[in-house]
Amino acid sequence: MPLAPRLTALIIFVVAVMSLRLQFDANLAAGRGNSLAQVLWGLARFFTILTNLLVAVAMGLVAMRWRLPAGLAFAGVLAIVMVGLVYHGLLAGLHSPTGMRWWANVGLHTVVPLLGLGWWLAFAPVPGWRALPYGMIWPLAYAIYAVLRGVVDGRWPYPFLNVNRLGWDGVAINCAGMVLAFAAVGAVLIAVKRRLG
């Protein structure tokens, strides 16, 4: 594999890992868990954290000469782009982070999504339209996981998944809307990539 995609992947890996570490440190400092395991378990309820972790792993492997298949690369970029779009479109106004949390927030919700999109457009293989359904697997799996966790412990990572407040019908509607949004953004990404490719 040429140097440029590997070096760029390494940069994304470093930014994602540093942002995740800052988020961990901020949660630990805020007392969101009394142990390493509790802080990690708390962070693991969020799509943002899990998706950035997956992107970090994928980019780390690419930096070590692993070639991402087109479908997997597409699913990854769709997920991380949606992290940025959903945060800036729906969630950014719900809190005002400062200090370490602000830096982590910018890294996880803005810098990594932009870098990931740039890497995908520049270096990833061109996906076929059949890749679109594969991009739905991770968000659907996450939604099921997050709702089940919420039912068990009563803590909801995002307002639109809160069964206690919205009811099952409301959450089902939100999940359907989420799938449609992923599909629409995914279709745009594939169309752009195919045009550029």
Image (tube, grey):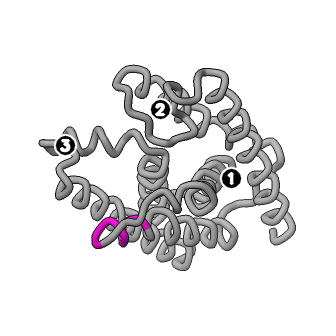
Label located before the other in sequence (1 or 3): 3
**Mark 3: secondary structure:** loop
Label located before the other in sequence (2 or 3): 3
Q: Which of marks 1 and 3 is in front?
A: 3
Q: Is the magenta stretch mostly helix, strand or loop?
A: helix
Cα–Cα span, label 1 and label 3 = 39 Å
The residue that disc 1 covers is 70
Instruction: Report if residue 64 is visible in the image.
Output: no
Magenta span: 99-105
**Amino acid type shown at disc 3:** Gly
Mark 3 surroundings: few (<14), some (14-19) or many (≥20) residues within 10 A: some
**Amino acid type shown at disc 1:** Ala
The residue that disc 2 covers is 146
Image side of residue 87 versus residue 39, left or right: right
Image side of residue 116 versus residue 195, left or right: left
100 is within the stretch colored magenta: yes
Q: Which of marks 2 and 1 is in front?
A: 2
The residue that disc 3 covers is 33
**Amino acid type shown at disc 2:** Ala
Mark 1 surroundings: few (<14), some (14-19) or many (≥20) residues within 10 A: some
Label located before the other in sequence (2 or 1): 1
- Compared with 177, 13 (above or below) is below
Extreme residue toward the bottom, this view: 4
Cα–Cα span, label 2 and label 3 = 19 Å
